[in-house]
């Protein structure tokens, strides 16, 4: 029943205002492209955060006890590493993983929206047209 009503509405709109229907379908495509670009941007941000988290090193790891000399010695710093205190490493890693998790959830929701609009663009075009009437 509902499918027949939707099909009748699609037929009415495509016959009465084909240009309006074309624009609404194009807008659905624009929403998909925009959500895809947002998703790609968030994935890039997640990769950058992940890379920074891998570079975090505990500054206490630079010191070690040299048994031969019976003294503390310093190791050479690793190129590209970011040395901070042990507590800061833990805090930044927790915060980083929280941000990555939130962004990953947003990307997943965007991906679901893209797939839904890709599978049934006519429904979302009707939704856009109904939104114009309100």
Image (cartoon, rainbow, N blue to C red):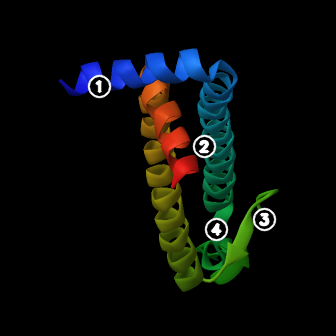
Question: CA gap, disc 2 to disc 3?
Answer: 36 Å
| The label number, if any, that marks residue 77 in the structure image | 3
Mark 2 vs 3, N-terminal side = 2
Q: In this rendering, which labeled residue sits more in front, label 4 or label 1?
A: 1
User: Residue 59: x and y, percent?
Assistant: 66, 77
Q: Nearer the viewer, residue 45 or 89?
A: 45
Q: Which residue is mark 2?
A: 39
Question: CA gap, disc 1 to disc 2?
Answer: 34 Å
Total tally of numbered discs in the picture:
4
Mark 2 vs 4, N-terminal side = 2
Q: Which residue is mark 4?
A: 57
Q: In this rendering, which labeled residue sits more in front, label 1 or label 2?
A: 1
Are the two marked residues, 4 and 1, in contact with CB atoms closer than 8 angstroms? no
Q: Which residue is mark 1?
A: 5
Location of residue 100 with respect to 130 vertically, above or below: below
Q: Nearer the viewer, residue 15 or 124?
A: 15
Q: Secondary structure at mark 1?
A: helix
In the picture provided, is 97 more to the left or to the right than 37? left
- The local crowd at label 4, few if under 14, some if 14 to 19, many if 20 or more residues have their Cα within 10 Å, is many
Mark 1 vs 2, N-terminal side = 1
User: Residue 127: x and y, percent?
Assistant: 47, 40
Mark 4 vs 1, N-terminal side = 1
């Amino acid at each position: 029943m509902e499918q027949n009503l939707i099909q009748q509405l699609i037929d009415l709109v495509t016959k009465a205002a084909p240009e309006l229907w074309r624009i609404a379908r194009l807008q659905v495509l624009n929403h998909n492209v925009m959500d895809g670009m947002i998703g790609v941007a968030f994935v890039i941000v997640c990769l950058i955060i992940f890379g920074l988290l891998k570079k975090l090193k505990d500054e206490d790891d630079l010191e070690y006890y040299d048994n031969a000399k019976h003294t503390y010695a310093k190791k050479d710093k690793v190129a590209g590493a970011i040395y901070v205190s042990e507590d800061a490493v833990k805090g930044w890693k927790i915060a980083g993983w929280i941000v990555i998790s939130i962004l990953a959830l947003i990307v997943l929701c965007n991906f679901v929206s893209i797939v839904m609009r890709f599978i049934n663009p006519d429904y979302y075009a009707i939704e856009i047209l109904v939104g114009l009437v309100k």
